[in-house]
Image (cartoon, rainbow, N blue to C red):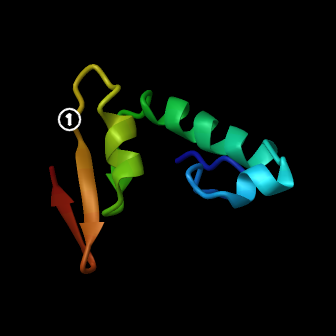
Amino acid sequence: MLSIDGDYIHLDRSYINNKKDCSRANKVYLDFHVMQYCDMAVIGSGGFGYTAMLNRPEPLKNLYRFSNKKFIKL
């Protein structure tokens, strides 16, 4: 299991531009890049994890979604 420290941010929200704080944006980019190297992944219902997994050689291999207290194989 891998966890990258830092706060998440929505890149499409205007407050990142107001604060001019790129450190939180860097975490998003790093998370997205690293996720493509995972052998197995459990993602939520949002699109971020699913989109990151599409960069893998076999995008749906060992990919699960956690929903309603259950793991669903995709």
How far from the left and from the top, in percent, is residue 9?
64, 57
**Secondary structure under the numbered disc 1 in the rendered image:** loop
| Side of 36 where 60 appears, left or right | left
Q: Name the residue under label 1.
A: 61
Residue extending furthest toward the bottom: 68
| Side of 13 where 43 appears, left or right | left
Q: Residue at x 31, y 63 (%)?
A: 45
How far from the left and from the top, in percent, is residue 55?
35, 26
Q: Which residue is drawn at 27% across and 19% down?
A: 57
| Side of 3 where 23 appears, left or right | right
Q: Which residue is drawn at 42% across and 34% down?
A: 38
Query: Up-down: is 58 above or below 25?
Result: above
Please identify the quarter of the rendering in which residue 65 is found.
Answer: bottom left
Please identify the quarter of the rendering in which residue 72 is found.
Answer: bottom left
Amino acid under label 1?
Lys
| Side of 18 where 65 appears, left or right | left
Residue density around tag 1, few if under 14, some if 14–19, many if 20 or more, within 10 Å: some
Whether residue 6 is visible here, answered yes or no, is no
Q: Residue at x 34, y 40 (%)?
A: 51
Q: 70 or 36: which is nearer to us?
A: 36
